[in-house]
Image: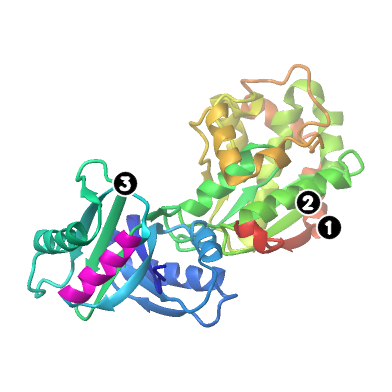
Amino acid sequence: MVKYDTVLIRYGELSTKGKNRKDFIRKLDQNIRHILKDYPELKYQRTHDRIYIRLTDEDPEDISSRLQKIFGISSFSFTRKVPSDLALIQNECLNIARETDKKTFKVITRRHDKTFPLNSDGINRAVAGEILRNTGLKVDVHNPELEIRIEVHAGDTYITSEKIPGAGGYPTGINGKVLLMLSGGIDSPVAAYELMKRGLDVEAVHFASPPYTSENARQKVLDLAQMTSVYNQGRMRVHIVNFTDLQLEIYKTAGDPYAVTLMRRMMYRLAEKIAQSKGCLAIATGESIGQVASQTLESIACINAVIRMPVIRPLVCMDKNEIIDLARKIGTYETSILPYEDCCTIFDPKNPVTKPTIEKAEGFEKKFDYDKLIADCIENMTTVTVHPAEAEDFL
C-alpha cells in the first residue's frame, strides 16, 4: 500500500493578493498549526504558493477533517515526496496505479521547476507510458476514474491521486474582529460561519431575558457558539447580557407595534458599546431583507440610526431555504430548531410595525431612562469562552 508522507496545501483567494499576500499566508500557516497542535511531530514548510506538512505516523483521516475546516485553503492532497528524478517519479506513480481498482487513468503534471528536462506534457507521456506497459489500466483524458497528480519542484516532486476541497475564503482573523449578535435561531450561527470565511475573528453577544428565557435557551446559544468555534481558530467568546429590565420597560412604554423596533435599537446601542470595549471594528447580524418585521428596509434604517459603527449582514440577500441548507452543512440546524425561546420571541407582538420612523421611535425613547438601563446591562454582563468540546468536533 502506498504510504503518503506529505500534505500539500494549496491557497485559494490568497493567490490574488498583492503586497500583503505574505501576511495572509503567514496567518493561514498559524491557523493550520493551531488546529493541528495535537500533533507536535509535524514538520511545516511554507512557500509563496504552497504549505507542506511532513507526516510521520499521524492519523490522516483526522488531519484531513481538521484541514477541511480551515478557511484560506483551496484544496489539499496527501502526497508521496520523491527526489525530482524521472525514473523515481515513474516508479511512485506506478505504485499508485498498481494499488487502485480503477480501470482508467489520467496523469496531470504541474512543472514548477522549469529546468526539469521534460515539460509537463512530456512528463505526462513518460509516466502514462510506464503505467500502460505494466498494468491493465487505460488512459481516459476526459472522464478518468483515477487522476495521478504530479508537482515537480527543484529538488523534490510531490505525487498524489487525490485532491480534497478546502473551505476556501480567507484565514480567520486576518481581516479583523467583529461582534456578532448571536441568538438561538437558525440565521446567526450561519452568519458566524460566513463572517469567519471572509477572514474575520468573531466574538458574540447574546441577549437573555431571565426568568422568561430558560437556562436551556442560554445553553443552546453556547452550544451553537461551540459548534462554530471550530472554524474560529478553535474558540469563541460569548458576552451574555441580561436584557430583562430593559425589555420590560420597552414593552411598558411602547406597547405592541413599536416594541420590537425599540428592542432592536437598544440591542444595537449595547452591541456598539461592547464592540468598542472589545476591539471589534464592526457589528454583525444574521438579518435577511424582509424576513421579519424588523428586517424591512424601513426597520433596518430606523434601527441602524442609533449607532455609527458599521453593521455587516452576510445573509442579507439569502432566502430562508439557502440559510437552512448552509445550517445543515455546518451542523447547527438541529440545535437551532430546539424549542427554547429567546428574548426576541417570548413577547411575540401581534402587530409589529414594518415601516417605523426614527421620529416616532425617539418619541417613545424619551419616556424612559434607557441610558441607565443600558449601563446596568453592561455592568452585569457575563462572558463565556467556548471551545470545540472533543476531537469528534473535527469529524
**264 up-or-down from 52: above or below:** above
Q: Residues within 10 Å of mark 1 (few under 14, many from 20)?
A: few
Name the residue type under label 2. Val
Q: Earlier in the sequence, mark 3 or mark 1?
A: 3
Q: In the figure, residue 352 lies in which quadrant?
A: top right
Position in image of residue 355 (x %, y %): 61, 20
Q: Residue at x 70, y 63 (%)?
A: 390
**Considering the numbered disc 3 on the image, is that residue within a helix, a strand or a loop?**
loop
Q: Quadrant of residue 178?
A: bottom right
| The disc label shown at residue 145, or none | 3
Task: Point out the stretch of residues depicted in magenta.
Answer: 86-98
Q: Earlier in the sequence, mark 2 or mark 1?
A: 2
Residue 152 seen in the figure? no
Q: CA distance from mark 3 to mark 2?
A: 55 Å
Q: Element at badge 1?
A: loop
Mark 1 highlights which residue? 380
**Camera-side residue of 1 and 206:** 1
Q: Nearer the viewer, residue 303 or 351?
A: 351
Q: Are marks 2 and 1 in contact (CB under 8 Å)?
A: yes
Residue 315 drawn at (x, y percent): 52, 37
Q: Nearer the viewer, mark 3 or mark 2?
A: 3
Look at mark 2 in the image and give the residue it sits on.
241
| Residue in the foreground of this view, choosing between 21 and 30 | 30
Q: Can residue 359 be seen from the camera position used here?
A: yes
